[in-house]
Structure formats: C-alpha cells, structure tokens
Amino acid sequence: MSESSLLSINDLKTYFFTAEGVVKAVDRVHLEINKEEVLGLVGESGCGKSTLALSIMRLIRVPGKIVGGEIWFEGEDLLRKSEGKMRAIRGGKISMVFQNPTSSMNPVYTVGSQIAEAIKLHQDVQKRQIKEKVVEILHKVGIPDPSKRMKDYPHEYSGGMCQRAMTAMALSCNPKLLIADEPTTNLDVTIQAQILDLMRALRKDFGASILLIGHNLGVINELCDKVAVMYAGKVIEYCDITTIFKEPKHPYTQALLESIPRLDVAKERLRIIPGTVPRLINPPTGCRFHPRCEYAMAVCSEQEPTPVKIGRGHTVACFLYTSKG
Amino acid sequence: MAMGEPHMKSEDETEVYKPSMASRVYVVWRELKKNKLAIAGFSIVLFMVLIALLSPIIAPYHPRWQGTSGIPPSLEHPFGTDGQGRDMLSLVMHGARLSLYVGLVAVLIEICIGVTTGMIAGYFGGKIDEIFMRFTDLIMTLPTFMLLIVAVSMFEVRNINVIILIMGVFGWPFMARVVRSEFLSLRETTFVEAAVSMGASSWRIIVHHILPNTLSSVIVLATMDIPWYIFYEATLTFLGFGDPSSPSWGVLLQIGYYYLRSYWWIITFPGLALFFTSLGFNLFGDGLRDALDVRARGR
C-alpha cells in the first residue's frame, strides 16, 4: 500500500448464502483508490458492483456475508472494526449516495432536518451553526433559495433536487471517500450533467475521492481517472480512463465498448454480447466470461485467470495475455 | 373572489404555500371531509369527548343526588330517574367520562406494549422476532375474557384502574403484529439503508426513522380499539365483575337490567350512548384509514 492510497481492497469475498446455494457476488476482488482520485466501476446489472460498494460500508445484510479479505482505509482494516467504530466512519469519513434519490429520504422529515441529523451525528457543532451549515451546503449543491427549501419535505423536491440533497447530506461531514451508486441512473440528461458537474466541483473543493458506480460508460468517461470493469463478481480489467477507451484488453471490455452507440463512427448495428451474465450460484468454471467470449481457448474453461500487469497501472485477468509466456 | 380584495390569495395558492407540517394535517383533514360517514363519526366522538370533559359542569344533577325514584323521561329528567331516584341524564354524562377514560387509558397501555414489542421484533428480525412473536401468539391464544374475569376476581378491591390495566396488558398482540409488519417492510426501504450509511444507530433508526412512518396505522388501530375496550369494561361490569363505585355505562346497564320490567329507560339510554360511541369511533377510524392512506388517494 503506497502513501497516496486511500482505500485498498484485498482479496475481498462477499457471498450470499441463499436457500438455492452460495452466491459469490464479489469474489476475490482487488481494488485501489488513491487520494483525490475518481474510480469508475462498470459492469452489467447483477455483476456485483453494488455489493462491492455495500461491502466497503459494511452494510451487507443477511443472508449476505463478507467471507474474507481486507479493506484498508487510512491504514486500518475496516473489516476488523467494531460496529460502533464503523458507525462513526459511515457518513463521517465514507459516505454513500444511493441509486434512487427520491426514496433515499425519509418522507416524514424535512430535507433540512435530515441533513442536520447527519451533521449532528458526526460533528461537534452548535445548534445555530448547524442551520447555517445546512443552508451553506444546500447552496453549494445548487438548491435555489436554500434557507426556504430546507424546510420542504422530500416529496416536494424533484428527482434531481433530491439527488442534490442526498449528495449534500453525503458531503456534509467532509468525507474522505464518497461512494456514488449509479447517481445519475434515474435522472434525465440535463440533470445528469448537473450532478456530474457537482461531483467534479466537489472533488476539487472538498478533496474527496469518489467511487463512481455505473453502467453508463459516457458518465464514467466524464468524471473518472481510472476504471475497473467488473464481470460476474470479479474485476477483470483495471486501468486509467484513456487507456480503456484507446486499448481495451479484455474481450469483455472490448465488447462492452463496441456496444455503446457512437456518433463519430458509422455503423449499421451495435455489437451485442451474446448470452447474459451467468447466475452466480453456479458460475462457469475457469474464466467466468468464457461461454460468451469469442476468443475462448481450452484453458479458459479449466483455469481461472489471475490478474496480470500488462502496462503502467493496467491489469487484466485474461489468458490471452498470460498464456503466451 | 370579491373585487375589493386584490391581495387575498386564491384557494390554490394558499394550499401551495402552506407550511409543510400543517399541510400534512390539512391534507388528511381535506380527505376526511369528503367522507360523510367519517365526519359523522368524528362529530359523535367529539360530542362524547366534550360531554365527558364538561360533565361536572353541564350535568343537571350531581350523580349522587336523589329524588323520586322511577320517574319516566320528562322535561325535568329527560332520561328519567333510576330505582334510587338518581337523574339518568347526569349519570349517563358522568358515565361517558368514565367509559372514555377506560378506553383511552387501555389503548395507551396497548400502544406502549404493542408498539415496543412490534418494533423490536420487526426491526431486528431473526431469533428476536421469533421469540417476541411466539410470545405474542401465546397471549393471543389465551381466552381473554375468561382471563379477565379470573384476573379481576383475584383482586379483592374492584378498582376501575385495575380492570383497565388488565385489559391493556392482554389487548396488545394485534397492535404488535401490525407494527411488526410495518417495520418488516420499512426496514428494507432505501431511506433506512441511507440512514444506516450515514452512521445512524439501530435505536435511532427505529425511533426516528421508522416509527414515525408507522404512526398512521397505529392511530387508526388505536381509534378502532377504544370502543372495544369500552365494550369490554361494560360487559365485565354488566356481569358483575366491575367496579360498582364508578358509575360507568356498564354499571348503569347492570342497574337497568334489574329494573328492565318496570323502568325501561334505565337500560335504554346508557345502551344508546354506548352504541353511538362505538359507532362514532369505528366510522371515524375507518375514515381516518382512508384519509391517511396515500395510495388510496386520488381514486
């Protein structure tokens, strides 16, 4: 773990013990986020992105369980912390913005009082100052007339405003790491752009690192420094943002990029990746992508590829790049 | 809108700019107003509550006052007098005070035990849920009325508060079930997850985040349970297990029963009071449920 590293995930395994069998939602994942860095986490639905995010917060609930691994944050292993200490970290040093902004707020309290609650929980601030802080932070995320709108209930906010307010809440205690789980999925494009602008500004103003989860590569491209591609519970490729668009290595990443509609390339049809994400109760043997992979070799169904470094800060888990040697 | 009042806001505008908490109450009230039966129920309840509160002032006679016995309803005694010459109207008014007291306090006990049990079982789930709910089932399977009779007979002093306490202590299981089921579904919501992710403790989430969201169910159930307790107390008293020193409606019914052949009015008026009170609470509770239910709105 280097000096600049903020969060480092080692060999993390989060399994769900269901009646049908064990679902390996996150399986031996390695990931690293540096200070003031934005890491994008992409993958299809059900590939374990959200589970990974919730694992960092230790919010995995029964029947799920973090089975093994380490999550190092500021030099301490989060998985070894007591629940009480974890509570102080949640919302304080690491905070999270959920996918669905309108249902992330308690309908019976005003937006302002919910943000105030977060501040009260983590900071030693006097009553009068709390109100000022709420107004200030709502202003920062671009809520018009914050001293008045803070008295509104969540249902009186639009989806975009709710997302801003949730972001405001997440940032109210100056977290070191912000986990944003598909923060723009349910918003229309203009609001998406606003939220992205907001995040960019926040990174500059607050010096926070961001883990941005999404399946929209356009959004990821807008904001991130590095990208990790997840497939069926595993990180299969990890590199910086320019590399992934210029020279994606993993067949899945390549296919994923070719399935994005683009204006600058004339193409009759978009590429479709055949098949679906495998059920994680009974994943394919070897490389989990091999049944859908056009370059699949014999070794792919027999052994699991380990991530290998193929360039500066570029790792891939694929036999195309290891079996040559 | 009148021409001379250019600054007055139209109805729509005032609605939009209403302060939020008041607007919630206002919305419920507006919904309730649409339902004529609910308003009828609300009026009856309000009327009974006023009678109960003001009975020492507005009752024409003191409950212990005695005149000629067995006078049928007349101008001087609208509800007649009983076998001991007491004014029935005054007795029914004072009875309202006592019967409503019984209903309210018993429901408060029910809420205390039922809500606490339900929220702990529903939020924590698993083994805790199992233990709490099996205990609740146990209480539910007990034949409450027999138990009440036995329990009341065990106390030498027939005190109305003892009866209330016993009723409340055995009456909470349904409340617990309702609150538990609300907690079971609410704990899965995103806003609860978001609260956890902001570092809120379990207790804080239970009391500050989930409980306020269950309030409407609790209020409706409590409203419907009040007449149930009044009935229970009246039945107990009618059967002779009550507190004869407190002239609740049950006591009056019991007295009326003895005079049924000679003085019909003694049993009639307390009976009617009981009937209307129960009707009022039920209609009001029903209307309240519809008014509080956001999903049913706008149909």
Image (tube, coloured by chain):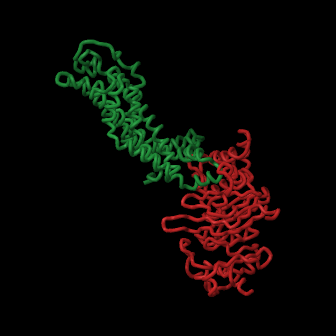
As drawn, the residue found furthest toward the right would be A3
> Residue B161: image x %, image y %?
40, 26
The C terminus of chain A lies in which quarter of the figure?
Answer: bottom right
Left or right: B13 with respect to A247? left
> A60 or A275: nearer the eye?
A60
Seen in the picture, residue A75 relative to A229 is either above or below; the reply is: above
Seen in the picture, residue B136 relative to B276 is either above or below; the reply is: below
Residue A300 is drawn in which quadrant? bottom right
Seen in the picture, residue A158 relative to A281 is either above or below; the reply is: above
Chain seen in red? A
Seen in the picture, residue A87 relative to B283 is either above or below; the reply is: below
> B282 or A125: nearer the eye?
A125
Residue B268 is drawn in which quadrant? top left
As drawn, the residue found furthest toward the left would be B261
The N terminus of chain A lies in which quarter of the figure?
Answer: bottom right
> A286 or A147: nearer the eye?
A286
> B145 or A202: nearer the eye?
B145
Residue A324 visible from this viewpoint: yes
Residue A262 visible from this viewpoint: no
> Residue B200: image x %, image y %?
63, 48
Residue B237 is drawn in which quadrant? top left
Count the labels in the image: 0
Left or right: B208 with respect to A130? left
Left or right: B218 with respect to A26? left
> Residue A172: image x %, image y %?
71, 50
Q: Residue at x 56, y 64 (%)?
A: A16
Left or right: B152 with respect to A87? left
Q: Colour of chain B?
A: green
